[in-house]
Amino acid sequence: MQLFTHIGRYFLLMSNVFRRPEKWKLFFKATVQEIDKIGVQSLGIVALLSLFMGAVICIQTAANIDSGWIPLYTIGFTVRQTMILEFAPTIIPVIMAGKVGSNISSEIGTMRISEQIDALDIMGVNSANYLILPKIVGAIFIFPFLIIMAMFLGVTAGALIGVLADLLPLADFETGIQYDFRPYQVVYSLFKTIVFAFIIVSISAYHGYFTRGGALEVGKSSTQAVVYSIVLIMVANLLITQLILT
Amino acid sequence: MIELKEVNKSFGSQHVLHDISIVFETGKVNFIIGRSGSGKSVMTKCIVGLLEVDTGEVLYAGRNFSAMSNRDRKEIRQEIGMLFQGSALFDSLTVEENVKFPLTLFSKMTAKEMTDRVNFCLERVQLEGSNKKFPSEISGGMQKRVGIARAIAMNPKYLFCDEPNSGLDPQTSIVIDTLIKEITYEFNMTTVVVSHDMNSVVEAGDRINFVNEGSIWWKGDKQEILRSSNQELNDFVYASEFMRVVKDNIK
Ligand SMILES: Nc1ncnc2c1ncn2[C@@H]1O[C@H](COP(=O)(O)OP(=O)(O)OP(=O)(O)O)[C@@H](O)[C@H]1O
Ligand SMILES: [Mg+2]
């Protein structure tokens, strides 16, 4: 029963979010700020994770295929496929759910309990639209860039460690990353990412927006925001993968 | 003028407001007083449309606000200013930006006109010189004053103040009360103040409505309130030793 109440309230909120902004100028300004907050300020962590994961996947694959029967370029191929298909588009958003989701939820939750949202509503501002739409648009815009960067850095780190640790010649790695390359897989990944960006922002905003009580509840909301975002990302990932790749 | 006609409001099985009928007069400071939990905040939220009434009407100068859709309410919303209990300033904006906020969204003013208006409002609450500070950098009393400046920025016809004195020392309280009183007369606003502070009532109250258990129990002015023989009202007014001393002096 509780579940249906949540779903109903969520869609009601979203129907208020997707309205025409009061002033386009303010909307664009807010969106740019969100792009900075959500995207630009996450560049460091995303880059770091991608580099390390690319390198680790390379080492792992190399360690697991030294049978002689499997060609060495498989290492490059595996690094590329893992980065493009799952690590960049799914795991990076999961990490972003922790970073960005909790931030969004506590920001909006604090505004709720300190009556700032009431203040907006009283002025006749559509608070849901004013607060949430720039975050959704900003995230959907910047996530694909983060993810492309993650793919690129992951593969580069794989190549580097492969050569430096003497796991395979660069030429083999190159063959691997070019082997059976299907561009639509990148499109599939970017599509996933956009869906996940929407999930993270809208779920976190929902939890913040309906916070009741005090500082303690703001904390609870942001924990819930992260947990539900991650669960929904996983479910959506399964559905999208099943629908598109098979 | 704001008029409530037989307003009822329940939360589940809890009936909070019972047949509230009340008139808030223009150019007067109208108080809503009552014990904690008596339904003052719920009443205010019903009047400004943050909560929907179950039955009854809320009329702004004859316009039936409670029956309007959100879109139609917009016009009246822009005639409403509200000072919140915790000030509710936007903490990512400076003092100046807070006051300017409703102007940027809803007025057709030029940048210069907006700046002038912001400065006028901030001067009106004696806060010149704090323009660039953030809400977290000023005191509670100053935040309340910025709240007032923001509330009057759009030149509202109706001003609501939810517990304007909570958390303030007696002297700062009086500054706020006086300010509310002065701007009400100056701009001929319909002002509604929610409070349980008897000092403010005596300081600024023109019309006083005592709410008890979700009903309007008593109404009158500040001369009458001190002499009323209504039992519940007396219990509320003379709850403190200080007010009992005042009472003895009146007699
Ligand atoms: N959103 C809500 N949902 C359910 N019950 C509520 C809600 N808001 C208020 N109530 C209940 O309505 C009653 C009146 O609350 P209200 O906040 O109006 O009191 P108040 O007179 O403003 O008290 P105080 O002086 O402490 O602010 C309380 O019993 C409260 O529990
Ligand atoms: Mg209250």
Image (cartoon, rainbow, N blue to C red):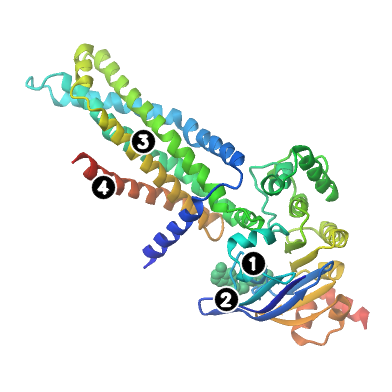
Relative to B32, A210 lies left or right: left
Q: Chain of mark 4?
A: A
Whichever of labels 4 and 3 marks the residue nearer the N terminus, that label is: 3
Residue shown at the point (73%, 40%) measured from the top left: B133
Q: Amino acid at mark 3?
A: Ile
Q: Nearer the viewer, residue B5 or B83?
A: B5
Which quarter is ligand 1 in?
bottom right
Going from the N terminus, do you reach mark 2 or mark 1 first?
1
For the residues beneath circles 3 and 2, the answer to whether they share a chain is no
Which residue is label 4 attached to? A239
Same chain under badges 4 and 3? The reply is yes
Q: Is mark 4 within 8 Å of ligand 1?
A: no
Q: Position of residue B16 (x, y in %)?
A: 60, 77
Q: Which residue is mark 3?
A: A92
Q: Secondary structure at mark 4?
A: helix
Local secondary structure at mark 1: helix
- Label 3 or label 1, whichever lies nearer to me, is 1
CB at mark 2 closer than 8 A to ligand 1?
A: no
Amino acid marked by disc 2: Asp
Give SS at disc 2.
loop
Judging by the rendered image, the residue that carries numbered circle 1 is B45
